[in-house]
Amino acid sequence: MSQVPSFAVISGAQVHQAVTGREKQVTNMIEAAYRLHGEGATVNPDSYFLRFPDRPSSRIIALPASVKGEVDVHGIKWISSFPENVAAGIPRASAVLILNDTETGYPFACLESSIISAARTAASAALAAVKLSEQRAGRPTRVGFIGVGIIARYIHTYLVGNGFEFERLGIHDLSADHAEGFQNYLERTEKSQVTIYDRPEDLIRSSDLIVFATVAGEPHVQDPAWFDHNPLVLHVSLRDLSPEIILGSYNIVDDVEHCLKANTSPHLAEQQVGHRDFVAGTLYDVMTGVTTPPADRPVIFSPFGLGVLDLAVAKYVYDQVTATGDLHTVPGFFHELKRYG
């Protein structure tokens, strides 16, 4: 007979402790989750966007998912993005994640998930950088960051955690204060030169790895000529690049159906030309040798961000906290357990 599981709450501090310093291990988890997704061992419905007529820049997104294999869990991430928070001195994004038991369907844990979301996003980007650079001219050594919030910091950490070494680092952000703050962070962790660029064109032309981690709602980088040196682009924020840049590049996504919607740059490109032929494939296709990135074109990775990745990291965190004996359960959380009282 199935048992009703206990219900636990896992704090952000516990999540941070479980993942920090384990960047390579988390990246390996993300690779395993991508392989399960590519093999059909996941369920990943469309994300649901809750938007507000009086606050068009803000949103809350629900990402339901299910993963088989060693992860073996259902769940949902509920993540908000309120950009105005930054001016008030608190982070833009906040999130929780619920894990559900695959046998009974009962939820058994609620985890603070902004750190899980940042870690899985960064691990996905770092994994793409590893896989896409393996078949090109070697790993990039000049990196440029456009948009320098928490996601950019995590991506830098995960690139370094996966063995990337940089000769030069560039920064561009609409906020001079944020750019200087990220510069100070990099100079504490890097021995290489760190430069703030006033113009995105100058940063892009001087970088062979470019990370977009902005909150842009529509393309703000328009000219394909800026990419004539064929860099590797981690287009994490999805809406920065014009359709012309997308159409002139070799494009890899995490999931075609998920990425080509909600007016992402690839979706805008599809609307412009009426087909998806410009998408070379998924990261899973790269990992399995179905498609090979060229050296003579810009290579762009546009990850929509799959809920299955969040579940893989969250289940790992739950297992880690359980193993250390620090799991905090809520007694009596499930109360009406008898059919007739």
Image (spheres, rainbow, N blue to C red):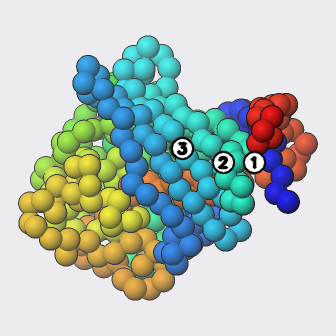
Residue 127 versus residue 115: which sits nearer the camera? 115
| Whether residue 177 is visible | no
Label 1 sits on residue: 318
SS at circle 1: helix
Residue 91: x %, y % from top left: 49, 26
Q: Is residue 237 above or below residue 32?
A: above
Is 191 left, or right, of 214 in this rendering?
Answer: right
Q: Residue at x 89, y 45 (%)?
A: 324
Residue 113: x %, y % from top left: 59, 39
Viewer-nearest of labels 1 and 2? 2
| Kind of residue at badge 1 | Tyr
Label 3 sits on residue: 77
| Kind of residue at badge 3 | Lys
| Whether residue 247 is visible | yes
Residue 253: x %, y % from top left: 36, 65
Q: Residue at x 8, y 60 (%)?
A: 272
Q: The N terminus appears in which quarter of the rendering?
A: bottom right
Label 2 sits on residue: 99
Q: Is residue 39 above or below residue 17?
A: below
**What is the distance, in whole Å, between disc 1 and disc 2 at their CAs?**
9 Å
Is 131 left, or right, of 312 in this rendering?
Answer: left
SS at circle 3: strand
